[in-house]
Amino acid sequence: MTLKSSIQILMLLMCLLALTFGINFGFSYILAMAPLVFGLFFLCGTMRKTHQIATFLIIVCLFAFYMFRPLVLVSNPLLYKFARMNYLTESMQIEVLLFLSILNTVAVGIGYALFRFLIPGDTRSFSQSIRDINIKDQVFLLALAILALYILVSFVKYIGMASGPGLVRLFELVLFVKFAFALPVAVIVAHLCGVARRSDRQIKLGLICIAAYVLALFLQGSKSFLIELAFLFLIYVILFRVNIIIKPKNIFYISVISVFLIFSFPIVTAVRLVTSDYGPFNFGVAEVVERLAFMSDFTTDGNFLLYVLDLMTKRFNGYDGLIVAWNNLYLGGDYFFNIHVMIVNAVSALIPMMQSEYASFGQMISTIFYGFASEDEIIHGGALGHYGILWVFSGGSFSSFFLYFIGFLVFWGLVFRFGARLVGIPLVRTILFGVLTLAFALCVNSGNFDRNLQEVIMLMLQGAVLSIIWSPAPGHTRGIS
């Protein structure tokens, strides 16, 4: 069983599960899923071309961020993240799923056509870049030093110092945090898949780098590390032209790892809440277990499995966000969700000491749709997913919505083209393309375009700088040291 066929089987099983919740809901869900199944089967091919990888990325993002959540909400509508705005009914879900079927069709069809035109080429150079270049141990040590400092500034934010968020933003801008994380992931994936073997020392250093990045995100209060690890691992497996065969004997180990990752999510959440109550170092296992039991009783009446699934899937913002935007569009009318604000906020985030006059998209969403008071805006960032924000952008006009949506796809096609064709050392191009695909996934999930645009510009600038720094002088070898 290949990786692509495994995803297809999971899609079909989820469609069958949807039918158990009623014919109307089930068929609406199948219509929303159908473009993704079709695109995965007919358009992605062998995923040896760059545009096929980009199309696969669209399909996987839409599948993850929009198709899991309906199955949770239909079983318990009270888990709807915006319940303060509307009581979620089955008819609301059916209406949004039918709209989602149109959106997914446009995304897969037009996305494939645009990407095929904008990012031609195959993936051979990506696997060659990781295979041919001699990566020195010093590079891993440098990445570890960067991530150690990143942990330090994240801890400053963790303990509540006022300068913490600004330090984290400045540090991400000045140094190459994402690259320091992505390089070890690429090396370890290549090693595990037999593309390019590395020494035990480098593998250990790489694992330490990944653990350091995860710890930094945890200290910042972010639980996105599972999404980032999963997508980055997946994209490098595909870029390195690895045909993964899932053998029956490995299904058990995959299941164990999956269960561990799923249940680590509520544990991380409980630890985060307990530390806010007792302090960073004044709690034990008993307090964490007690908080887990309380959260399960409070949200799902003691159904711990449903609680875990809700906790996992509510990090996928797209479906809930599209529902609330579709039914409460008028609430965004007095706020500044537009391209001008997006650009001003993105540029302000890139320039140290510059402060935008506008609240971020995340803060505006927290105020409008979550009901947070103004004094709480700074510490909370909401998200509607890219479909939801585009619907607010358009003001409810279908023509404007699809115009914005096509512009969204063109923008990302140009970004991927830049990443795939960056001149200079091929390894930098490989790492850059990986982190840009990760930025795309996070953009689809959040829809906070101001933050996403800032990160994309930052990654492209950092990639260009690294390409210049690491380009070998004439007559020198292509090793990195």
Image: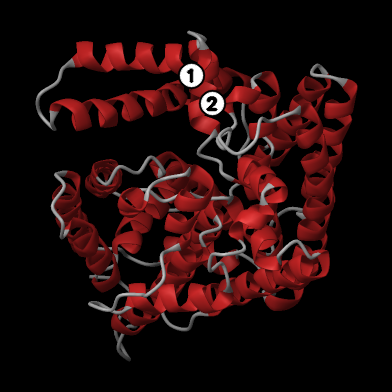
Q: Residue under label 1, please give it.
A: 299
**Residue 310 has which mark?**
2
Quarter of the rendering containing residue 273: top left
> Can you give x and y, in whole percent of width and height, for residue 281 in the image?
10, 28
Farthest residue, direction bottom: 474
> Can you give x and y, in whole percent of width and height, for residue 17 in the image?
77, 21
Q: Is residue 159 left or right of residue 58?
A: left
Q: Amino acid at mark 1?
A: Thr
> Can you give x and y, in whole percent of width and height, for residue 447 in the image?
56, 57
* Residue found 65% across the figure and 45% down from its top: 324
* Residue found 59% across the figure and 65% down from its top: 124
**Residue 388 shows in this picture:** yes
Q: Secondary structure at mark 2?
A: helix
Quarter of the rendering containing residue 257: top left
* Residue found 29% across the figure and 61% down from its top: 177
Q: Is the C-beta separation of discs 2 and 1 under 8 Å?
A: yes
Q: Given this view, does label 2 or label 1 mark the residue nearer the observer?
A: 1
Q: Amino acid at mark 2?
A: Asp
**Residue 466 has which mark?**
none
> Can you give x and y, in whole percent of width and height, for residue 188 in the image?
38, 47
Q: Secondary structure at mark 1?
A: helix
Q: Is residue 155 left or right of residue 328?
A: left
Q: Is residue 399 left or right of residue 192?
A: right
